[in-house]
Amino acid sequence: MSQWPLKWRISLMVASAILAAAALNGVTAYLDMKELLIRATDHRLQSMTTGTFAVLDEHLTDEETKEEVRAIVGISAHRRVSVFRVWIDGNAADVPSSQIEGEASARILDASVLARVATPAPGKNVRFDCGKAGDEYRAIWARSRSGVGATNVAIAESSHYIYEDLAEYRNTLLWGAGSMLLMTIAAATLLVWLGLRPIGRTAQMLSVITERNVGEVRIEPDGVPVEIKPFVRAVSDLLARLAKALQEQKRFVSDASHELRTPLSVAQSTIDATLVKERTPREYRAALAEIHEDLDRMGRMIEELLVLARLDETMPERELEPVELAPLIESVAEGCRTRVVEAGGMIRLSLSAVTVRADSAQLMRLFSNLLDNAVRHGPKGGVIEISIRAEKDGVVVICVHDEGGAIPADALPHLFERFYRADPARSRSTGGTGLGLSIAREIALRHGGDITASSAPEEGTSFCVRLPTV
């Protein structure tokens, strides 16, 4: 069934639900009708027994009594749908009776039939069914005390017509339910087809989208049913995100090509200039040192590109482990302390014991990149401060602050973009690749956190990392 078209599955489910409801209503209506017809018959039989006892109280002759009772139960020369017997306990013969010896109806209320029925108490009656299939009777047996003993009145009325009426009623219900089912399947199929047309139109729009026009196609949810609007809107948003990702990828490839071509071109120029004429050993060593520096910078860039590629992958849960932040940051700071001290500055730590669940190697790279950024772009001889602050909502904030504060306000939103440099010339001269902050932010996001940056001449520059604690 899972391979069936959606419209047929929905139509089948709707039809099944309606069929179940129709079947339940039909059975209920059938039983109610049967009970109503039997109750009406029982009411007539009760009236007949009451009238019969009234006739018996008049002390008429047997023939007169018989005629009166025949009139009460509706027996005539042209109509025989009822049978009756009247007798007194202890007397073998009936007082009056409608039964004629030799007729089939004579066996409707004979002793063998009444023997299977519980004898009613005086003043009470019992109701029962008798006869055979196709010739059913509904009967009542009532008893009443009199001066000559307990008088019994048994009257049976043909109920065959009840079952004929019920059969016709049942057939009407079945025809009605079948017609309703067919109309429901047709209507549900049509409605589902109409309801799914917007999805078909959306599919047609999606089929013409390629990597070249993905940013140009916008699927609007106007003119579609309310239930499908979230789907259409989600597809449209997905295309927008995909277009943005493709655009960023193209820009990244372009920037990476440019950044890698620059040191390669410089190295090529150095080689060409060196080979123009004979050089002294000292000049060759100087040229080789320049080439080595360019290749080293290119190697660092390739390594960081590989790091970004790995960060784009989903991190397995098994790589995460409890990590104490204070010792990790102390280790990172110790690795940069020599450079800071040689420049006449210092590193100040304000740490507290906080544990996060993370990949320790990636966290070390994150804080190394932030500290390296502060060392490169902070003022010479300034103080770099690293602090840890635990917040109440299960988040720890780690800030790396330097005394620079020269980052323009319009550059702050772009600091974490790949290859972005607020001061391109200065960054290249200091050996930066423009990927350090991007890597730091990717690591923070990978661990369920984020990084924010702030910079002002009077306050300095701060990079704050927010991470969830254990």
Image: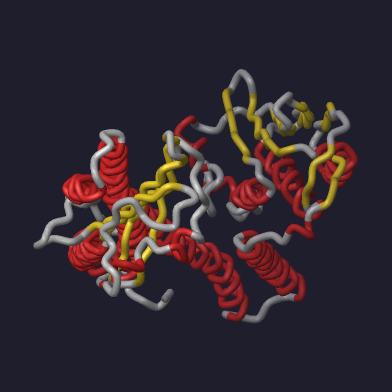
Toward the viewer: 195 or 329? Answer: 195
* Left or right position of 284 against 346: left
Q: Return the residue found at the far left.
A: 78
From the viewer's side, name the closer residue of 356 and 453. Answer: 356
Q: Vertically, is 372 above or below 183?
A: above
| Quarter of the rendering containing residue 285 | bottom right
| Quadrant of the rendering where the N terminus is positioned | bottom left
- Image location (x, y in percent) of residue 356: 80, 41
Q: Position of residue 457 (x, y in %)?
A: 58, 22
At 42% across and 35% down in the image, what residue appears? 146
Image: 162 above or below 32: below
Does residue 29 appear anywhere in the picture?
no
- Along the line of sight, which residue is nearer the eye, 323 or 394? 394
Q: Is residue 411 left or right of residue 83?
A: right
Determine whether, in the image, residue 424 is placed left or right of residue 446: left
Query: Picture quarter containing residue 326?
Result: top right
Quarter residue 375 falls in: top right
Q: Quadrant of the C terminus?
A: top right
**In this rendering, position of residue 383 left or right of residue 152:** right
